[in-house]
Every structure is written in C-alpha cells, then in structure tokens.
Amino acid sequence: MWVRNALSSCRRHPRGPFHPFSRSLATEASTSSPVAPPESSLPQTSHPKTSQRLPITTAIILNRSPLITRTPSLFERAYYAYQARIQRALHNPFPYEFWFKEGSPLETRFRVEDMKRERKAFGKPFGMPATDAEGNVVGPTYEDIGLQEEDEESMPRTHAVDTQGDVKSLDRKGQRNLYLLIKAKSGEEGEEIWKFPEGGLQKGELLHEAAARDLTAVCGPYMDTWIVSRKPIGVYNPPSSSSENSKSFTFFCKAHILAGQVRIDKKHVLDFAWLTKQEMESRLETDYWLGVKDILSDF
Amino acid sequence: MSSSILTPAKATLSFRVSQVPVRYAGRKPEASGDPKKDLIRRILYPSNLRNKPTPVGTWRPEVGHLLQRAIPSKQAHETIERAWNLHLRHTRWKREAELARKFECMRKAMEELEKIDSKLYMGANKVEDPRVWTAAELEKSSQLRGAEKRAFDWRIRGLFPRELRLPTDTPSRNGWDYQWKPLGESV
C-alpha cells in the first residue's frame, strides 16, 4: 500500500497513461547525436562510447555519521540539573536493603556518592554526613572509599586530530556529519576543483550500482561502505556552457562509510578531505555549492 | 534519601501531603521463610501507620518542604517550563525544516530522472524485500566461513548494516578502523 503511495508521490500530477518504453526510446534517439562529454575526468572503465550516450553522471555523497552524541547547550544542562533536583526532592526514599547487601562495600560507596549528589543539588546543610554529640562524623565518608575508585577511564570526546586540523582523518569532529570531497581536474581547461566523487553510467546499469562502481574506482576498495537506497537524493545540472542543448545531470546517491579509508591514485584524483557542511562552502564552486547544500545535514 | 531538614517550616504548608489510599494496616513481619521474599514483601507492602516515609510512597510528609527548597517559586517554575518547551519547539522546527529540504531535493531528483530515463526511474523505485535471498546469495553464504560469512550476512539488501553504530557519549578506545580490507584480502 505504501509502495503505491511512494510511487505516486514521485510522479507529476495529473497522471495520464504511463508509457515507459516510448519515453526511453525517445531519450536514446535524441542523445545519439554528438554530445558533450559529461562533467567528469575519471577513467571510463569498459565502454566509453555507450557511457557517453546518456548525459548522466552518478556521484556519491559518502557520509561518516557522528560517532559521539552532541554536547548539550548551557540551557539544556541547566534544565537537566534543575529537573534532577526536583526529582531528587520528590522521589520516594531509596530502598537500600532491597538493592544492596547490608553493610557491603558497594552500599557504603553508593551512600557516599549519593550524599555528594545531594550536597551538589541542594547545598551545604543537605547531604552532609550526620555527626554525633561531640561533632565527630558518623557513618562512611569519602576517605573510606577513596582507594576503591577503579573506574575505567573513558576516552576524551575531542581527538588529537581536532587540534591538528587534519582533514583526512575520520576521527575528527566526532559529533558532526563528515562528507567526502575529492579534488580533481575538471573539463578541458584542467583546473582543479573540489567535488563529490563521481563517474559515468554504463549501459544496463542502475544508478546505485553505478555509484558503487564509481566509488571503488575513484576512492579505492579499502572502504567498507553501504549505499543507503536505490533512489538518488539530489540532482545537479551545471549551467551548461556548451553550444548543444544537451544538459548533463549529476545524480547523487547517499552512502555511509563504516570502516577503512580512501586511497587515491594521484593521476586522476589529486586530493581528498572529510569535511563538515560549513567547511565545504569555501572549497566548492558557488553553483555546485548552491545545488548541493540542501542535500547535506546541517550538524 | 535524607529527610535532614534542619529547621522546621515556620509557615503553614500550602502543599498537600502526598497520600495513597491503602487497605492493609501495619503487621508483624513473618519471620519464617525466605529472607529475600520477606524483604520484597516488606518493600512492596509497607505498613500504613504513617510514622515514616516508605519506598512505595504511601506517606511522604516532607514533600512540601523539599519542593520549596527545590524550586524558586511557582511562577519561576512555570517560566522555566515554558522556556524549555519553546526550546524544544525550535529544535523540532529546525529538524523538520532540514528534513523538508532534503526531501524536496530527493523529489526533484526523482522528477528529473523520470523525465530523462524511465528505465532508471523504474529501477530506482523498485522496493527490495529484505526477507528474500536469491539462490546465488544463499549458496554464497553457505560457502563462506567466519569473519567473511559474518561480513556477508550482515549486509542484507534493503536493510541497514549491523556495523552502523549509534553515537555514544565517548568514542571507542581504538578509534576509527583504518586497516579495513575487503572480502578475500584478509590481513
């Protein structure tokens, strides 16, 4: 049921009778005339003539998802602390004898830590250990459990490469979405531009298959990637400077990188970088950036 | 939980003392039997003699005092709640706006694809059932072993891979795996 809805939402309105084959034949006939080569300088692997028949290039938006959760803002932290204080005031007395064995070191440790939390939430008269008549402290104190702190140290949230600014590293900016950009020579002039990895489409191939093949061709097979869907997530047609009225289209497919790293041969691809959306703006050409920016995640 | 209120409240309480209607009265614990069961019974069914607070919350006399200390005032609390809801609303709008932009890009792409090449369009619209394995895939899976088999089985067509991790509070000890090799090129 939802399949039909998805299909109908992708079609234009109103719908007439659907003629798939006549339309594809029309497309092939019009593009059999000489067509400007698509916007890519990458090696066409086996059938150069047939891949240039369709003015379609497939590009991949390879995304490294966030590795760590987002840092809460100051307001969020303050609100969470406020709610924790209210909960601490209102919740039922904690049943120590249910959760801990009577007098066990774990119970001692929990009691001391809880006093500390209470002190932090409400201030000094609360959460102070009880004192008897002479003013001596009764019950366990922090010093009793001091040497038992054997918590595993977790890794810090910022990596060393964050300070170094190494844009090839995949550990950088753990909270953000990173996207792969490639620096390659474009067109006949040979100027080097940054863009997403792309390549041509072969006969009989679907978009996502072409995207996978192009990715291994451009970036090497030493990456564990997963292409999310058969459907393209965006399209870019550059303002065509060629005299023929053939436009070229670049269809973007989304993929995730799960492990590995890019390995480029320096002949066609000069450089690569893993960048956030904001860092990309300065490197991409204006038209390309405007065509691509809505596809990417802001954070 | 400490009920260490050092100074009793001077003003009369405006908060209702938290009460839950109960039917069983205080009773002597049954000394026979499993101490664990007795403990559970004592926790779940406390006496209703109203002389001290209980874990199940049948009688909490100090709630009013504690609430007065926890929140600045009723008006301040309401303002904080409204500010929080506003913050949530704004983050929700931002998230929805981003999703709408992305969906619009996708819709335009599919529209262009339909105009250009309908075979590709039909191919892109095909829905893959993750439950169905072709005969070739089944045979390949039966021939693989160990890490290779796991790597193959975890990539089900039409479903997300198992290696896709959720973000955690701190990163993993080993960091990113840069030494990944494709199937058939182990070590």
Image: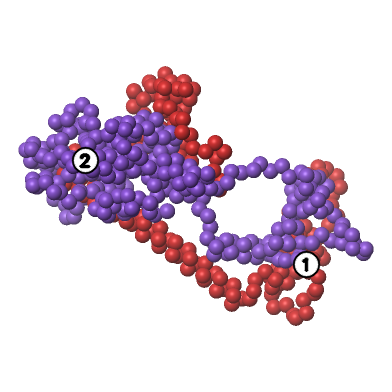
Three-letter residue code for mark 2: Gly
- The colour scheme is by chain
Q: Which residue is mark 2?
A: A190
Which of the two residues, B100 or A52, is positioned nearer the viewer here?
Answer: A52
User: Considering only vertical position in the picture, is B16 above or below A236?
Assistant: below
Disc tally is 2
Which SS class for mark 1? loop
The answer to whether A121 appears left or right of B102 in the picture is right
Quarter of the rendering containing residue A80: bottom right
Quarter of the rendering containing residue A124: bottom right
- Quarter holding the N terminus of chain B is bottom right
The answer to whether A34 appears left or right of A44 in the picture is left
Three-letter residue code for mark 1: Pro
Is any part of residue B152 visible from this angle? Answer: yes
Q: Most extreme residue toward the bottom, as rendered? A: B11
Q: Position of residue B34 (x, y in %)?
A: 81, 42
Q: Position of residue A88 (x, y in %)?
A: 68, 62
Q: Tell me the subunit letter for badge 2.
A: A
Q: Which residue is mark 1?
A: A125
User: Considering only vertical position in the picture, is A172 above or below A116?
Assistant: above
The answer to whether B3 appears left or right of A1 in the picture is right
Q: Residue at x 18, y 42 (%)?
A: A189
Q: CA distance from mark 2 to mark 1?
A: 74 Å
**Image hue for chain B:** red
**Image hue for chain A:** purple
Q: Position of residue B40 (x, y in %)?
A: 75, 49
Q: Residue at x 61, y 44 (%)?
A: A154
Which of the two residues, B139 or A73, is positioned nearer the viewer here?
Answer: A73
Q: Most extreme residue toward the right, as rendered? A: A134
